[in-house]
Image (tube, rainbow, N blue to C red):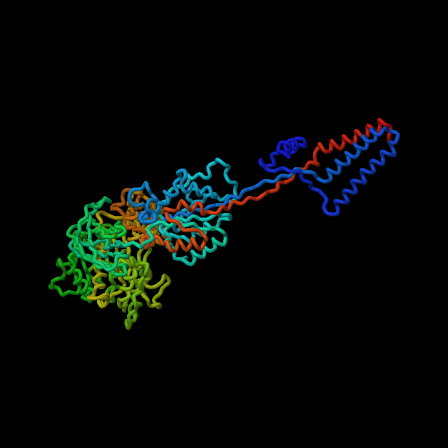
Amino acid sequence: MSPLRWTWIQRLFGIDGTEIPAGAEVHLTWSNLPESWKVFVALLAAGCAIAAVLHMYRSDAARLPVRSRRLLAGLRISALVLLAVMALGPALGYSHRHVLEPTLVVLRDSSQSMAVADAARNPENRGAFPGSTGDVTRAQAINALLSPDEGALLIGLSSRGRLRVLDFAESVQPAGMETDDAGAEPPADGEQQADVSTVHPVTPTGIGTNLHRALAEALSERLSAGIVLFTDGQQTDRSSGKDELLALAQRAASRGTPIFVVGLGDPNRPRNVRVADVFAADRVWKDDPFELQGALESEGLGARMVQVELIEQRREDGSDQLGEGKVLETREVALPEAGGPTRLTFSHTSKEAGRFAYSLRVPPLEGESSSDDNRSTVPAEVKVIDDKARVLVVSGNPNWDYRFLRQILEREKSVDVSCWLQSLDEGRGQEGDTAITHLPRTREELFAYDVIVLLDPDPREFDEAWMDLLTEFVRDHSGGLLFMAGPSYTSRFLGGARTEKLREILPVRFGDLAAIDVESLLQSEDRDWPLGIVERSLDHPLMRFYPEINRSLDAWKLFPGIIWSYPVREAIPASTVLLEHTDPALNQLHGPRPLLVSGQFGSGRTIFAGFDGTWRWRQAGNNAEFFNRFWLQTIRFLVEGRSVEGKRRGTIETDRSRYEVGDRIVVVARLLDPTFKPLDAMQVSAVMETPSGEKVPVILRPTPDQPGRFEAIATARGTGRHLLRVEFEDASAGAKIETALSVSPPSLETARTWQDAELLKEIAAASQGAYFTAATARDLVDRIPDKRQTITVQGQPQPLWDTGLMLFLVATLLIVEWALRKRFKLL
């Protein structure tokens, strides 16, 4: 029956036609139609009913004309037929054909390896990018292939299903086109298949590649036409490897979801040498030689000689711009046959003070895949200090620590040392670069020094006025102070009425001095205890012998232990414990006994050494190298606090000085208020300025139970030198509180940059898909199977019997029959 007639029937019976979808096939159905033997019963009942009516009108209306009897019988039979029809439940049924549209997932690799400009280097891809000049990055290749231009690949893919475009690196993110309505109606003919303009270009910024996670996300679709994967195949996530990837591909095949891989990049391993790193000490002294260490990474070049240049660039104060580079040294370096790292060490003596950046450069080599990485991405930043540090050493007796420390400082060109040996006979001259004839007692005399070193001093030569000057020297004038305890005088010095003020300056708490004095006397000296190295503090300037923390730790393990130590209850909050006692019998409520502690008092730095006998450390290393470096690092650490012009209200530090993009940066600041007491604040604002000029806010929050100490977590972004600076609301902060750090590209993404075509082909084959290059990528549309499914949906029947029209017809027939019977005078 034509749709027009069905519409007429719907109107006649008063049925709401809006419940029947447009285009549905309408048909008549019976809700109560009898089945099996019940059909014969129904037919027999209908026949009996008709026969009874005919018999009734033959007998009761025999006197009426035949036409009248037939009319009356016809009316009665018609009413019975209508009632029978109503009993069978006539209804208008409809069926609708529904097309399930599959989802086609497009995965785009957005890791940093996609920024490598070798997409057109593969001979198979020549001519794939006719509009480009020069080489093309892999990300640019993806954007060109998936451009929204009419007739491009993305349009063809959208005709095969609903597109879901995802970018993946270490995680998976939607790329602007995504639908969760798998199985929805396809667009009508003539309509655009997909709004491809909503797909943004891929940006290669990811710091890693988790191909397994991307494929697992794509396989989560219920009805999928397939997966189109654009990648170089380099999997950097260590939790899954080749076996796991192939297992996913086999799972895709079992679900009928083929993976179509578009391999990007040069499949040939690069022939390349890369400057991997260069580093040096943050601060050095003018005319003092220092080391710069670097590393080269070579691959595919075999055994050959290359030139390596050490370049110096000056950085003007307050500027992020580097001056013109100057080649300091050119060296011939042999690369290993099998490739890999080559470590270099340069020595340089700066004749000028200021800030300098040092980098390594390898001139481009013949046949090298890329020369973009032939120079340090992040140079080593070094501050050269020109002033001689004035150091005053006061010792109660001529022990070996005093003797060897004096020799070290007298040899050091950057230090002008004056010594005051209290036990020296009257009339004998004191030692040092600048000899003194008396212990400095005036402000002018004492404040002329940058650092004061007290080695178990005799308290008889000190008074309250001298201690007040020392307090002012450290607290208000950024002077450095080191106090080394000893068995001779320390208890009397710390407990004496005239000198006890020293306890307020030192970064430790002593408790009951009378009990400490007894404990010190009872202390056994028949064995030495290994040093308890606090590994979290190995990056502290006093502890750092090498840029690598593990190497510094190995060096400290060479040191002999300690025999005698001064009892200390605990380190004060905001200080840094560097060494601890390992004797478990000396453990207290607050943990092991602190031996070496670094702290801050006002604007000055302080160090407490609760033991003597460091001269025994000379046996570690070659020619007392670690002993000498420890003491020089200690003096320089104290000097650096003094070298900042004006007063500085704290420090800001990071857990490392060099990071890779995406690394977590732990920021620790120790801050003081305008009165140089630990700052009490709910938060402190800092800013991290990136090489691009972007200023990223960093919010520092207080560390529980450590007054003046604030912490924050930041993320390394961009490459190059970053400046981290505290921003006080008031203008009385004095010198800037800032630190610099370097960020380099992620090593996981830069170590393996070639296309792993073999792996990609295996993934495609295991999933029953196919592998394509950039040049043949447009052919993959024809390989995607048609996964559209058509299903017929039966709608809810619309009843015809339960309508006013049916009731009206039955009633009309019975009323007419009754009226005619009355007319013909029948009962």
If the image is split into quadrants, where does the N terminus sit? top right
> Is residue 535 shown above or below 227?
below
Q: Quadrant of residue 655?
A: bottom left
Q: In this view of the protein, which residue sits in the foreground, 412 or 434?
A: 412
Q: Position of residue 223 (x, y in %)?
A: 51, 47
Count of residue discs = 0
Q: Is residue 520 above or below residue 224?
A: below
Residue 284 screen position, x and y as percent: 20, 54
Taking depth in this image into account, of 699 and 295 the one nearest to the observer is: 295
Do we see residue 473 in this rendering? no
Residue 457 percent coordinates (x, y): 21, 62
Quadrant of the snapshot with the C terminus = top right
Which residue is more in the foreground, 41 or 243?
A: 41
Please report the residue visible at 77 percent of the width from the left and 42 percent of the height from the top: 43
State left or right for residue 124 relative to residue 316. Answer: right
List the single residue furthest toward the bottom: 526
Query: In the rendered image, is residue 174 in sight?
Result: yes
Residue 799 vertical placement versus 555 (above, below): above
Residue at the farthest top position: 823
Q: Which percent across, then down, holds residue 718? A: 31, 47
